[in-house]
Amino acid sequence: MPATDSSSAAAPLTSFGRSFLSHRRDQIPPPPPDHHSHSHTHTHTSSSDLEIDAFHRHAADLLHDLLSDSNSDPSAPDLLSLAWTRRLLDSFLICLEEFRAILFALADSQPLSRPPLDRLLLDFLDRAVKALDLCNAIRDGLDLIRQWRKHLAIAAAALSPAPAPAPAAQRGEAQIRRARKALTDLTILMLDDKDAGGVVGQRNRSFGRAGTTRDSLPHGHGHHRRSSSGGSSGSGSGSHLRSLSWSVSRTWSAARQLQAIGGGLTVPRANDIAATGGLASAVYAMGAVLFVVTWALVAAIPCQDRGLQAHLTAVPRTFPWAGPLITLFDRILDESKKKDRKHSCGLLKEIHQIERCSRQLMEVTDAAEFPLADDKDSEVQEATQELVQVCGSLKDGLDPLERQVREMFHRVVRTRTEILDYLSRPHNAG
């Protein structure tokens, strides 16, 4: 996929929750103001408390929605399905947008450059940068699943009955052999990718623009490699939205990246929360959500050296979102420990369906005699129908999910750039 700037990727969120800030976003300009107003201090304080509390509660509501299952809500997608993963990213994008809105709306009463808020923000931005490589690795994993789908489609086409009104031909030896060849190639490909830790090959693509160097990153915080791929470099305000992360090298590890994002994620002290008017707790909440969302993506999608060893540091249950966040983390962890998922390339529901359908079809057609007996043919037909269904799910779901991962990448870049630009302004030096 060609790299694009974030202006082209800024599609509207497919929100399934209402933002508590939506009624007044017109009053919150994208960049923070260039001056401080010190009047009505008590009003600012009470207003900030209400908005920060509302942010925590809305994050909790979004996470609760992710825990819904088809038993309690027939419209809820299954955990770790493509549809559920898209909902996960929806939740993250909503939280990030509301976090950014609160931060800049309260910047007058709580200057972002004043300790300890400046330190907490820089720590969060460092974690956010690490999430960008994961976005690129996840995109490569989605490409890998597309390759698997091609083999599935060959097998499905070989085994599917002729469309009406053509007469239904019995599945012959040629069709079975062709399907088994496609499924054998798929199995070998999935095993090779599993042994290689999900690496698709040396890539030089990114969701961001090519040509960004270390020196061009805002305020010297960039520390990644130079991209060797081509592409336009952009100019003007677009230069702030270039990639802070390029495709990963063969020594890169998703497991280590997750440990870096989640490591040292400490609960803010009471005096820090008081000194920042509550913003310290919002920064901590956003960091915890960032970690669990990236961890869930790595759990679901094949990527290089994927591992779920990173732990969620103990989160106080006093935060409204703590309960659903911990429950979500534990459910995914439990899913990874199931016998039939423990050694999978990824926990995505559709990957499990690929593995199950392929194995079932290979078993039922092993040493088959032709023409197939009626019971054998019925088993092949049933497995083929599931194969066609998963092919359709992959065809419909992979592209929208990739667009959301792209949107996550660009929104993280934009938020980081805006915060760093604010911190660098001369009036914030004091």
Image: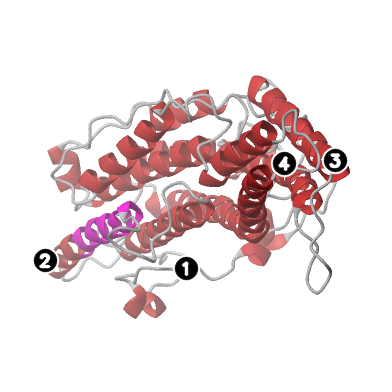
Q: Position of residue 207 (x, y in %)?
A: 68, 49
Give the distance between the C-alpha atoms of the residues marked 3 and 1, in whole angstroms: 64 Å
Q: Is residue 45 above or below residue 426?
A: below
Bounds of the magenta segment: 51-67
Magenta span: helix, strand or loop, mainly?
helix
Q: Report which residue position mark 3 lands on.
A: 173
Check residue 138 for magenta coloring.
no
Q: Are marks 2 and 4 in contact (CB under 8 Å)?
A: no
State which mark lies toward you, 2 or 4: 4
Q: Report which residue position mark 2 lands on.
A: 42
Q: Report which residue position mark 4 lands on.
A: 148
Q: Report which residue position mark 1 lands on.
A: 30
Taking the spot 42% from the left edge, 23% from the top edge, the residue there is 309
Q: Is residue 301 above or below residue 62?
A: above
Q: Are marks 2 and 1 in contact (CB under 8 Å)?
A: no
As rendered, which of 358 and 102 lies closer to the eye? 358
Q: What's the amino acid at mark 3?
A: Glu
State left or right for residue 230 relative to residue 62: right
State which mark lies toward you, 4 or 1: 4
Q: Earlier in the sequence, mark 2 or mark 1?
A: 1
Q: What's the amino acid at mark 1?
A: Pro
| Dot 2 alpha-carbon crowd within 10 angstroms: few under 14, some 14 to 19, many 20 or more | few
Give the distance between the C-alpha atoms of the residues marked 4 and 3, in whole angstroms: 24 Å
Q: What's the amino acid at mark 4?
A: Trp
Q: Is residue 144 above or below residue 424?
A: above
Q: Position of residue 187 (x, y in %)?
A: 71, 30
State which mark lies toward you, 3 or 2: 3
Q: Position of residue 158 (x, y in %)?
A: 81, 49
